[in-house]
Image: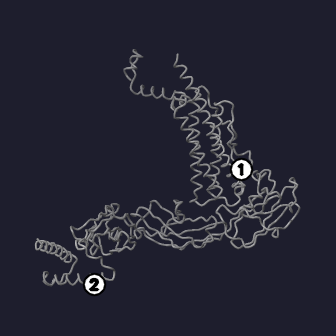
Amino acid sequence: MLSLFFLILYIPAVMSSSSQTAAIYPQDPALTIGSTLTATCSVSPDLGLHASSLFWSLNGRRLPSSSYSVLSPTALSVTLPGLPASRQRSGDNLVCHNHGGHVLAGSCLYVGMPPVKPVNLTCWSRNTKDLTCRWAPGGQGETFIRTKYTLKYKFRWYGRERECEEHSAAQPYSCYIPGDLALFTPYEIWVEATNQLGSATSDVITLDILDVVTTDPPSGVCVSRVGDLEDHLTVRWESPPALKDFLFQAKYQIRYRLEDSSDWKVMDDVGNQTSCRLAGLRPGTVYFVQVRCNPVGIYGSRRAGIWSEWSHPTAASTPHSERVSSGSCDSKSGDSNSTLRRELKQFFGWVRKHAYGCSGMSIKLYDQWRVWMQKSHKTRNQVLQGDKS
Amino acid sequence: MSGHVKIMYPQVSISPTARTWLSLMLVVAIHPSDAGAACGNTPCGPSLQRSLKLTRLMHKESGDLLKTYKASQGDQSDLFCQKSSNIVPDPIISGLDPSERILSIYSHCKTFLPHLTRVTEQQTDLQPPSSPLLNQLLTAQNRISGLGNQINCLYQTLFPNLPIPPEPVDGPMSVPPPQNVFQQKIYGCVVLKRFKEFLANSARELKTIKDQMCSRRKTFGHANALF
């Protein structure tokens, strides 16, 4: 604010390049962090100003006169040791003022570092139609000044190199190649970083488009109850339509969580089905479910692709347990193991009795037991009510 | 249509192709100044109201734009706007009567656009691509073009017998020669500051015109109705 107090009225001839009253050298320099700059303000003799009456400011702060040096009656220099990184991309404002605070001339300093080779270059193709690549700057210093990143690619064994041209303003370290890509042909891809202080090139990655394919998340995800089973839900979905023309087998993953929890449980072994049953859920509870797809074996390849994004969350609730609604206490975390153990004991007893020691233990058998338990519970209740009457 | 032609030229039979060409030539022959009919026939109708609302919106946005601009240029950028310049259009609406003043608003719209374009180009080099300043500058460019068209329409509606000069009367449209970065920062600030002032002046002017001319027309309308 004090600096604003000094600096009033207008800037006489800074705008006019044809009749400049003052000039700073160097003009708009690029400098390395930690380096020293000596700048000179030269004023026109017509102004009738002596260099000793001038002063400097940097980003609005007046610089100490101990850093000044009067070179001539019309030239005053300033030395800035150990320059810090630029405060803004448009450059730090180094300004020469007359004794009244009027701005005579200015120079914008760009203080940063030469680029370090970009890292973590990864690419993916959506449905084999395009290619998006992303990387990270190799160093922080280059981010303080304008650094240009160019993604380049070529066929591995022949052809000229091409540049990716579609950059996203929202994602500065990525580029998008919309099409015209060959399949079954290795590409070499790399990133070149350039700024006023130097340049650097990333490592080259080699890939076949078919090795980095991802797809859209499954659509039509639907979660529903399984009859009255209080701890089951069924999830159904449709395979991504974009890949229906390809010879591939997709594999899927499901994840689900309680409504008020952030911990997801993931089911990996879903295979290429488009439905799955979740079991062992808490009765009377809302669950959020998501599904994602991996395009495996495109065009006969055995390689897995890249997992798609998760589908939008779909919610459903399990039926309320009759035992819970009849007033039994909620079991605490420490009791859940004994509850599970008791249920397992009941289940195995039922298997021995009704499944004749069936060796093919499966979730289907467990579901049958659950149904049997519910039916027998209802029957018991009816008998008890009959006794009371 | 064919029946109408036969009545007008009972001795001439015209082929369908010729009829089509005749229709096209009639359309092309319409004088461009009659485009005022496309702007609306009501002098105090929606055209004036739209122009006023757009000007007020732009004035509000120009305040935000100037604030964003200053924040993007670094500390001390408040000073940059104090420069006086004969390159940047001044914000004053000139003219003695409403027709001249509306024409002045229109001319200013034309002269400010290349300066806004130049500032956008310069800031595109100076700012990161994600800077909100760039979108705001593009919006200002689009809006000033639209406002110019609106004012043009308004002028033709209010003064259908007065032609619009081919060249703007208020100031040159030329932009400054190549500048160093510091000069660019100053230039941009002066342009946006004057742009904001121009919009404030235009809003005030349009309100005055609306009050004066449209009230007068209502009064005359009532008076005529008595006879």
Q: Provide the secondary structure element on which disc 1 rests.
A: loop
In the image, farthest residue toward the top:
B11
Amino acid type for the residue under numbered disc 2: Ser
Residue under the image location 60 percent in, 36 percent down = B207
Of badges 1 and 2, the one in the foreground is 2
Q: Position of residue B201 (x, y in %)?
A: 65, 40
Which mark, residue B177?
1
Q: Provide the secondary structure element on which disc 2 rests.
A: helix
Q: In this rendering, does residue A344 appear at all?
A: yes
In the image, farthest residue toward the front:
A389
Crowdedness near tag 1: few (<14), some (14–19) or many (≥20) residues, C-alpha within 10 Å = few
Q: Left of A154 or right of it: where is A37?
A: right
Amino acid type for the residue under numbered disc 1: Pro
Q: In this rendering, does residue A167 appear at all?
A: no
Front one among B178 and A66: A66
Which chain letter matches label 1? B
Q: Position of residue A93 (x, y in %)?
A: 71, 61
Quarter where residue A360 is shown: bottom left
Quarter where residue A100 is shown: bottom right
Q: Position of residue A11 (x, y in %)?
A: 77, 53
Residues at circles 1 and 2 in contact by the CB criterion of under 8 Å: no
Which chain letter matches label 2? A
Q: Look at mark 2 in the image and give the residue it sits on.
A: A338
Q: Position of residue B82 (x, y in %)?
A: 73, 51
Q: How many marks?
A: 2
Q: Is the residue A207 above or below the residue A16 in the image?
A: below
Quarter where residue B4 is shown: top left
